[in-house]
Image (tube, rainbow, N blue to C red):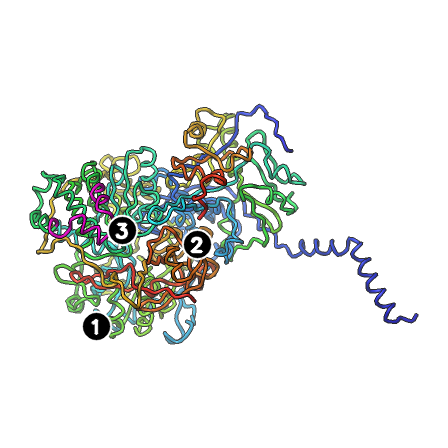
Amino acid sequence: MSEHHEVASKEKYGMVIDLDKCTGCGACTVACLSENNHYVREDESDKLRSVAWMKVYKVTNGEPFPNTKVAFIPRPCMHCDHHTPCVSVCPVMATDYNPLTGIVSQIYTRCIGCRYCVGACPYHARYFNWWDPVWPEGMHKLLNPDMSPRMRGVVEKCSFCNHRLQKAKDKAYVEGRRDLRDGEYVTACAEDCPTKAITFGNMKDPESAVAKLIKSPGAFRLLEKLGTQPKVYYLSNESWIRALGDNALGRKRTARPA
Amino acid sequence: MKLDRRGFLKFAVGGAIGTLATPIPWDMIDESAKFTDLWAPEPAKGPSSFVHSTCRLCPGGCGITLRLVEDKSGRDEWRGWHHKEFIQRRRLPAVPLRAVKIAGNPDHPVNHGGICPLGAAGLQLLYGTNRVTTPLKRTNPKGEGEAAWEKITWDEALNIVNGKLREIREAGNPHTVACILDNKKGLTAELIDRFFRAYGSSNVITMPSQEDVETVGLSLMQGTGGRLAYDLENSKYVLSFGAALLEGWGAPVHNMMVFGKWQEANEHTLVQIEPNCSITASKADKWLAVKPGAEAALALGMANVIVTEGLYDRSGIAHCQGFEGFKALLESEYNPRKVSEITGIPANVIATTARAFAVTKPAVAVYGRGQGVMSGNLAEFMSIYSLNALVGSIGTKGGVVMQREVPFKAWPALVTDAVALQGLSQPRIDGEGGEIKHGVCMAHNLTAALKSGAVNALVVHEANPCYALPGAHKFEEAVAKVPFVLALTSCMNETARSADIVLPVASYLERLEDVASAARVPYASMSLTRPVLANVPEARHPGDVFLTLARAMGGSVGSSLPWDNFEALLKEKVGGIFASRRGWIGDQEVAMLGSSDELWEGFNAGKCWYEEPVFGGGGLTFNPQGRTPHFEPVSWMEASRDYPMLLVAYENINIANRRAVDTLPYLTKNIDDTVLQKHDLLVRVNPETAGRMRLVEGDAATVQCPTGRLSVRVHMDVGMMPDVIGIPLGLGHSNDDPFLTGKGVNAYEVLEPVADPVTGLAVWWGTRAKLIKA
């Protein structure tokens, strides 16, 4: 499963995050936690144990006071289009690239917990469940019926809210349509973002908002040099933020993660 | 068979090797992992539906959409006597429901579908582990160790409260009853205020807020109070004096939505004036790192440039009074060179910023500090507000706007008897009163008032002063001395733990209530929180609790509050909006509606009422009662030998700090490890300053202040001003919440309120400090 064969599909979903609009509030993270049935540990202040599919990284330009600037990079799964690293290494096909939608899935019941994919992912987008998921008494009521909580011993990651795609398609079929309209299928993070920094949609539809935004001059992707062709694009007019996108090693070294 | 030592060892080693060669140990490890796995719960399936409601976790008032799913797991608790009553009283659907997600409501004018992390996590408050589920009565004396509770019924609880209030009133001391609210906005708060006035006490006091200093400043300079708002969406040049525009100030989601639009249009300039590199400062077009507390001086320096270069709005100034005196003061005291010394901002930067601010139209200067809880002195507000008058931005599009009141039907006249009148004639315990201090709340004076024995009963409604008043631990000690303390709360907090009786109130997702006008938004609006669920069946609407108490008390209190329940009151009040014919409900004009019932139905369908902003009224007095805007340092700004550094509090949008709402579990995932690491809070210190103290990243240290000491760790932050320590507000709870208790330290304990010399209001945002390596 190292190379995906292009199939005649009208869909390829992607995301564009405008980093100049993002204020790092973390509403996307909470929207994701709530939509995707994440449990919360009592020791979330220990970040080595914390799981969040949509993690907001804080970066700084490294300039001394008073020229310092910070920015935020929300990081979902990149749903890499080419040589998807996690798919390449999975020994049990628990993670799969869907050529019809471009979405990289994770099948929890197939996962054997070997964590090859966690090591292979260049974006740290995958998390292993070291502990049993626990909800305090009464809290299980807020579980989303469309999403299965993950058991101990499996790897999990952002699914681009794949269950929302299924729902949107069901709705379109009932209404006699085969194609989804732009905005009919959006992820929870894109829906809730207060600055509307996150745009989600079908990149193969030239009229969609994402297809237009990825052509912007300030568009870039994380670690493009690896050639994984992520389907998550970032926009920024700040050159120091764009430089961080490719780790900036060997170039200007002042900018660094906070 | 004889087994010697050698033979035994051979057998043991051989056996061990043999066992390892079999799959048995590996299978056992595998099986034990499977046997001990708790597996994940399967969420109960069911058809889902969506309802609109309103968030009231902060003053932002966002419209929210709740996704509800049929609740098959919880059917049992829906049986029993209360089931039928709830369906009737709260219009609950016959099928039990559970809420699985809160999203923004795209049709709400305030937030247009966006939501903040706290709002999105609201269901964890509803289903939270530290909800108060029944009325509680304390069984051990206050101030003696951990509280012990006995569960009692509502009837018993209300009898105790009624008896206590009646006893105090009959002794002729109604003014010795005090009540603390988070704020006085909304009908529930107004109802409680009315209850106590009819009872004979004017001591209904709110938690500290910037709005108090604004109220005083506006009534002095403009002759009217009112809620200060800003038309940020249409402003081309925004000069923010420390307001955390993108981190929770005013209506957070509204501001962030406006910011998103600014970034798209690319024709707006945001200048952030604050000492440290905050998110707003980073996202702004320009950040002016002013010395802490010198914001007023900077505003006056800019005013000097605008006035001396003749860039001010001449026609507007013609309607203002005291301009000549103000001009003379600016020219003599606040030339850019002198201001540069006070503020640390180069004189040319002051001048260029002032010119850009004066020539770009419309421009607005925003007064603020953080999210709006901390405040500076009156002179600071007047200095910053004057800038708006100079550039003609008062009451204009893209400028400062006075938010109109929602045209609710007026309250009927208060019924008072001799006892009530006698009680109301007594001075208020926090020192409110007189011409200047009229209508403000000075909660920082309560500690002394409670200690002096002036209060026989204290009622705390949805506020947490034992945690969130500056000098919180002293207040907590004072509360222990009050003979009777009643707390109304939906979740157990520090204040409820110091109470004698705790009454469980319904959360915002379980009760019908008005949420009027989002803070700082230029127009009036109103939508309802709706009782779509009843997770805690025993919890009651606080409005209903006070109406029940009023009926039980009878007399002037009963006659002043004659409504059967809160819903009846709300419905009557909404009639005023219909009668005013103002505004829109959803996409329908109120003037086109046939009856008040139609409007009521609209509200109950989750629609929002709003109207266009009303501009106008630009006149202002620069020197009311001889008080010209000036720079007035706060006592702790002066460096001292014992305390060479300044501790400045800051707020984080993921650490809930307003409206007595605690940081919800989901948000703990968002709190950075540069703020909180395991159980330790990290203070922000400039690396240069830390290096001088031989501190490196993550080192344990003690922050020593005149008022106390805190154990912290150090985070080296290049964006911090040297010699300033930044400490987050909202951590260090001790409220038995497993996700929060014992994490970090409570900065409120060391912050030192200083009384403003004119208003007596608390000036608080920092204190002197020393950082010691632990």
- Answer yes or no: are tags 1 and 3 on the same subunit: yes
Q: CA distance from mark 2 to mark 3?
A: 24 Å
Residue at coordinates 21% horizontally, 61% vertically from top-left? B761
Say which mark, if any, is on residue B290.
3
Tag 2: Cα neighbours inside 10 Å, few (<14), some, or many (≥20)?
some
Cα–Cα gap, marks 1 and 3:
50 Å
Residue B496 lies, with reference to residue B366, above or below; the image says below
Q: Which residue is mark 1?
A: B173
Q: Chain of mark 3?
A: B
Residue flagged by tag 2: what amino acid is it?
Thr
Residue B490 in percent (x, y) is at 39, 59
Numbered disc 1: what chain?
B
Q: Are marks 2 and 3 in contact (CB under 8 Å)?
A: no
Q: Is residue B89 visible?
A: no
Asked whether the residues under marks 1 and 2 belong to the same chain, the reply is yes
Labels 1 & 2 near each other (Cβ < 8 A): no
Does the magenta-highlighted stretch encompass residue B607?
Answer: no
Inspect the image, locate mark 3, and give the three-letter code of the amino acid beneath it. Val
- Looking at the rendered image, the quarter that the N terminus of chain B falls into is bottom right
User: Circle 1 sits in a helix, a strand or a loop, which is it?
Assistant: loop
Sequence-earlier tag: 2 or 3: 3
Q: Start and end of the magenta stretch? A: B330-353
User: Magenta: predominant secondary structure element?
Assistant: helix
Q: How much space separates mark 1 and mark 2, taking CA atoms?
A: 51 Å
Q: Amino acid at mark 1?
A: Asn
The residue lying toward the viewer, choosing from B553 and B404, is: B404
Label 1 packing within 10 angstroms: few (<14), some (14-19), many (20+): many
On what subunit does the disc labeled 2 rest?
B
User: What residue is pinned by disc 2?
Assistant: B674
